[in-house]
Amino acid sequence: MTQLYLVFFLLWLNLSVYSQIGINTETPHRSAALDVNAPNNDKGLLLPTMTTSEKNAIANPANSLLVYDTDKNCISQNLGSEIAPAWTCLTLFNRKFLYMPSINIKTTVPGNAQLDLYKIYKDQFSTPMSISAGGPASIPSFAAATDLYYYVTYYDPTLLTINSIDANGVMDYTVLRNANFDAYMNIIFVIR
């Protein structure tokens, strides 16, 4: 009888309690409300819908976790890690990027400087100098600096050093020497 109790006790210890549901899997990920495997590849999945704030509040989201972001109108996937999530819109019509308008960067005095990339974007996109027939008076733009990611894809490292670009598009850089006529920088915005 003691052995029977021992067997039941050991079985009880091995039981795991999940608040998640796994379909065709015995180990659903702890950040997923539903972990589905379709063995016959003949079914789809209707994703949970939530606002951007709700999505960002998910604790330790699994890499590749998917939700439908109702604020951004897109399927959003965590391409980062559980510790450092990086949510990205996957829906084709939201996968857009644009080049920064042409700008001058002051390089006359060596030292640290800042440039608000988002402000320059808003200033130049809100009042174009010429418009095609039937075009709106201003170019549609994003209301908040945090709606975009900011990338520098090229610059002359002998001319300056980019120290950081914050989430609001403020670029901190150090001028190493004066620019010559052919120095330039490529800046690209990507929609979050």
Image (cartoon, rainbow, N blue to C red):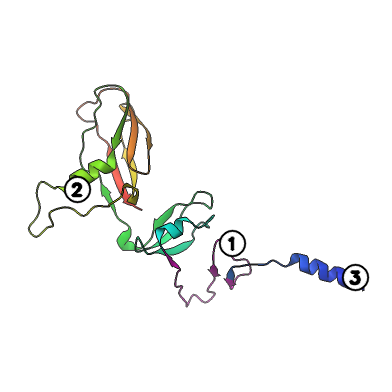
The segment highlighted magenta reads: 22-50
Q: Which amino acid does label 1 sit on?
A: Arg
Distance CA(mark 1)–CA(mark 2): 44 Å
Using the image, tell me which numbered label, if any, was put on residue 125: 2
182 with respect to 64 (left or right): left
Q: Does the magenta stretch include residue 30?
A: yes
| Residue identified by numbered label 3 | 3
Q: Where is residue 163 in the image (x, y as percent from the top left)?
A: 38, 32
Give the mark nearer the N terminus: 1 vs 2.
1
Task: Say which residue appears at 29% left-offset and 45% top-offset.
Answer: 188
Q: For marks 1 and 3, give the CA distance.
A: 34 Å
Image point 45% across, 59% down: which residue? Answer: 55
Q: Quadrant of the N terminus?
A: bottom right
* Helix, strand or loop for the magenta stretch, by majority: loop
Residue at 88% across, 73% down: 4
Compared across the picture, whether 7 is left or right of 176 comes to right
**Vertical position of residue 1 compared to residue 137: above or below:** below
Please tell me whether mark 3 sits on a helix, a strand or a loop. helix
**Dot 3 crowding, Cα within 10 Å, few <14, some 14–19, many 20+:** few
Front residue of 81/50: it is 50
Q: x%, y% of residue 178?
A: 25, 23
- Which numbered disc, 1 or 3, marks the residue that appears first in the sequence? 3
- Tag shown at residue 30: 1
Give the answer, above or below, for where 170 lies relative to 90. above
Amino acid type, residue under disc 3 in the picture: Gln
Where residue 46 sits in the image (x, y, percent)? 44, 72
